[in-house]
Amino acid sequence: MAKRKSANPKGDGASVYVGIVGLGYVGLPLAREFCKGGAKVLGFDVNSKAVATINRGRSPIKHIPHTTMSEMIGSGQFRATEDMRELSKPDAILICVPTPLTKNREPDLQYVETTCHTIAKYLRKGQLVVLESTTYPGTTREVMLPILEQSGLKAEKDFFLAYSPEREDPGNKSFQTSTIPKVIGGYGKESLRRALEVYRCAIETLVPVDNCEVAEAAKILENTYRCINIALVNELKMLFDRMGIDVWEVIRAAGTKPFGFSAFYPGPGLGGHCIPIDPFYLTWKARQYAMPTRFIELAGEINTGMPEYVVQRTADALNERRKSLKGSRVLVLGLAYKPDIDDVRESPSLELIEMLKEKGAKVDYNDPYIPQTHKQREYDLRMKSKPLTAKTLAGYDAVLIATNHSEYDYAWIVRHARLVVDTRNATAAVRSGRSKIVKA
Ligand SMILES: NC(=O)c1ccc[n+]([C@@H]2O[C@H](COP(=O)([O-])OP(=O)(O)OC[C@H]3O[C@@H](n4cnc5c(N)ncnc54)[C@H](O)[C@@H]3O)[C@@H](O)[C@H]2O)c1
């Protein structure tokens, strides 16, 4: 495959052989970057369908094109397998498995633990194991280390251990995996040295830190920072609306300050596998230190209340038009948790649809990237995306913009819809038909 001018001062990563466990939104882009850096990559996943798709040179995720996947497979540098016995082959094993919450909103480390037990079976001397999944500070040392040492090998002597959080941002056109600086913390000095050596061929800027805990905490800080700032603008959105002030205009104005302010935007709630989940990993850990994390709890409370606010705004807007939400036809635009991706994990759209249905609305959705819903942790909507035509739009009492996909023609949507509830300021540039738009 076409090689990137390698960041490795030695010129290429031909001597690097990595195994990547978990070939999802994080694992696959990482595999791509290692291939570009010239490394050999063996991908591991328990999902046999995904493994077969990848080995056919097809991509299971939208933002990695099929052509990239077929180049990676065609180059002979990459293949995927379900056979965990092959874990003894690569020199470094990078773990990118899910870290969700349990039903009681506590860290669910079952995927990390299972992976470590499997690695321990095949671990050989000299191998480096790196956790990339987001988790609370202490996971690498307290959870992974004892499992891996069940192999009979000693960390920092026989094998090496590090934590390096993934900062993948699917759909971000300005940054890709190789250009996002990578924080790395080692269990010991030699672990760190080896981890830096491995990542050097794939990532342009490496940021070594004192230990695994600093790296784990840095990732949680980044995501908590987003979660709290989004909660702040969500709260201000509700306040400013009562005051007759447009919060998006306020953020646009404040954003002109060249220092000391970073713009965050309100929305219908938090989505994705990171921001709604990761801060609660820290909250859980903080309890062991008898320390309440009030900022995080408050942000969570505000953000999780957003879908209810949006439903109320929709009901109020229909009421203004002498209609009740019960019996109204509502079309939700966008199921993905953010624009231009096909990931619905924790998407607020799912909750919006459930809440609207509970209140008696007849709900459909459209999403160009998600033709039908699949069973999620909490939802099983069993719905199919409705085609978007002028006629279908006009048939709904309200069109609710939940995700601002750039593919949508918002002027056209407003022209044909009877009422548009906009949770993303997606219609900001639409000039005519503004009386039909309600921001929420
Ligand atoms: N998606 C993102 O944008 C993003 C960004 C930064 C960090 N993260 C973090 O990265 C981690 C992975 O997230 P993701 O979005 O890639 O998840 P994902 O669900 O897209 O991919 C995880 C993959 O791991 C596989 N898997 C599960 N258990 C396994 C096992 N025991 N052995 C082998 N494979 C196994 C699954 O089949 C799946 O293909 C999470 O901790 C997440 O918080 C995600």
Image: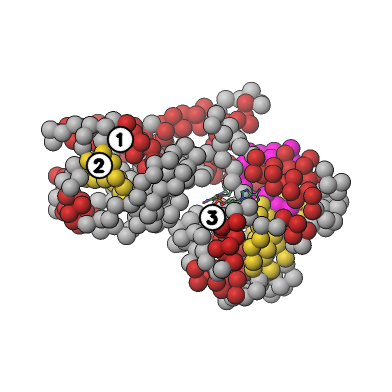
- Numbered mark located on residue 163 in the image: none
Between residue 16 and residue 325, name the one nearer to us: 325
Separation of marks 2 and 1 at Cα, in angstroms: 8 Å
Q: Residues at badges 2 and 1 in contact (C-beta under 8 Å)?
A: yes
Residue located beneath label 1 in the image = 356
Dot 1 and dot 3 residues touching (CB under 8 Å): no
Q: Position of residue 180 (x, y in %)?
A: 56, 58
The residue type indicated by label 2 comes to Val
Q: Secondary structure at mark 3?
A: loop
Residue located beneath label 3 in the image: 25
Does residue 256 sit above or below 243 in this rendering?
Answer: below
Does residue 300 appear left or right of residue 249 in this picture?
A: right
Looking at the picture, which amino acid does disc 1 mark? Leu
Is the residue at mark 3 in contact range of ligand 1, meaning its CB lies under 8 Å from it?
Answer: yes
Q: Position of residue 36 (x, y in %)?
A: 60, 70
Q: Earlier in the sequence, mark 2 or mark 1?
A: 2
Mark closest to the chain's N terminus, 2 or 3: 3
From the top left corner, tell me how far across and down residue 336 is, in percent: 40, 49
Neighbours of disc 2 within 10 Å: few (<14), some (14-19), many (20+): many
Q: Residues within 10 Å of mark 1 (few under 14, many from 20)?
A: many
Task: Write the start and end of the magenta stretch as one range.
Answer: 129-142
Looking at the image, is mark 1 or mark 3 earlier in the sequence?
3
Q: Pick the quarter of the image with the N terminus.
A: bottom right
> Which residue does the numbered mark 2 point to in the structure image?
330
Q: Is residue 80 above or below residue 342?
A: below
**Left-right relation of 212 to 30:** right
Query: Label 3 is placed on what type of residue?
Result: Tyr
The secondary element bearing badge 2 is classed as strand
- Is residue 133 covered in magenta? yes
Q: How is the image coloured?
A: secondary structure
Task: Please identify the quadrant where the C terminus is shown.
Answer: top left
Q: Secondary structure at mark 1?
A: helix
